[in-house]
Image (spheres, rainbow, N blue to C red):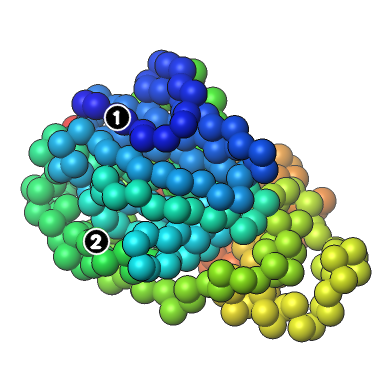
Amino acid sequence: MEIRVFNDFVSRPIGRGRVYEMKLDDGCARVTNFVFDRGFVINFFDMSTAYFTNQDRIGSMNYLMINATLMGRYVARQENSIRSRIQGMGIIHHPSSRREHIRIPTMRYIGLSIGLDLNGFRPIGLDDLPDVSVVLDDICARYRMDSMDPFILDDDMMMELYALKSLLDDPDSVDDDVVAVLVSDLVRRLYESDGPRFSEIRGSEDARLEDELYSRIMFDLGVVPSINGICEEIGADKYGISRGFKKVYGDTPYSLQRHYRLITAGSRMLLGERSMEAVSETAGYGKENKFATAFRKEFGFRPKHFDKEFGNPLVTPNRSG
């Protein structure tokens, strides 16, 4: 399986693929490419440069790509079209050899792109579903393959994607089986969902203060932000910027940050963390009971019932494949 990135990258090998890095005057871009034996690849994007040009091709191009934005905002120009994605949005498409010019208006952008080989993907634990080709064809049809219309990733999908990010943060010690189970379960959730919720939020290409506020509050989810203090620092009216922030990012600043603090906590429980003290601290809560109350209010169940209510694929007996 051939992976090629057409850009001025410096690359080096890792155990499961390669790391591509490009340094510019205003930041850097890193793409870590992982190749797995079960017929899928994952590209882990971590970019802190304002402008970036990308063109990629994956093997024979016979892939279904699931692109997910985990943090930041991404504005892409391709020929005469502009598209924007924010945290919690995804698209499904075929890989393209066309060049696109990308702008990252936030301090940083983190995303995952999961490529499933339409002829060779071998999932784990989906024996109760139709043939994998039928499943992938259905996903392609329902999620408007190649339309580039962004859809909203459900909370359970985001927890799995954050868990994948956590595993891929250390590229030299990736657990292939755990990654394969999470990718397979993400496919299950896409297939079994009631239908994609396509986003009406396209983002604004020019939202300087909103992007600045986002960058201040979203890249350290272990800290509860002081919105008043940040607004004073950047010279913004709290109420005015909160209205603009919701138009660009879909929620108020504090609610969005709290939601993703709890998503991060859920991803840790998904991977087996059972110390409520540790999970609470991850989510920025000093007291476990406050964390448990907030988690139940956000997701409808208490943290101690996580595996049962979430349907954790990592503790589900059916992991054959």
Question: Taking 259 as reference, is 95 left or right?
Answer: left
Tell which of 303 and 200 is nearer to you.
Answer: 200
Q: Is residue 206 above or below residue 139?
A: below
Question: Taking 42 as reference, is 97 left or right?
Answer: left
Q: Report the amino acid beneath label 2.
A: Asp
Badge 2 vs badge 1, beta-carbon distance below 8 Å? no
Residue drawn 55% across and 38% down? 29
Q: Report the amino acid beneath label 1.
A: Ile
Q: Where does the N terminus fall, quadrant-wise? A: top left
Count of numbered tags: 2
The residue singled out by tag 2 in the image is 146
Residue drawn 9% across and 54% down? 134
Near mark 1 (Cα within 10 A), the count class, few <14, some 14-19 or many ≥20, is some
Q: Residue 238: horizontal and vertical position, in percent?
A: 82, 78
Which secondary structure lies at badge 1? strand
Is residue 159 visible in the rendered image? The answer is no
The residue singled out by tag 1 in the image is 3
Residue drawn 59% across and 79% down? 247
Q: Is residue 234 above or below residue 251?
A: above
Q: Where does the C terminus fall, quadrant-wise? A: top left
Tell which of 264 and 147 is nearer to you.
Answer: 147
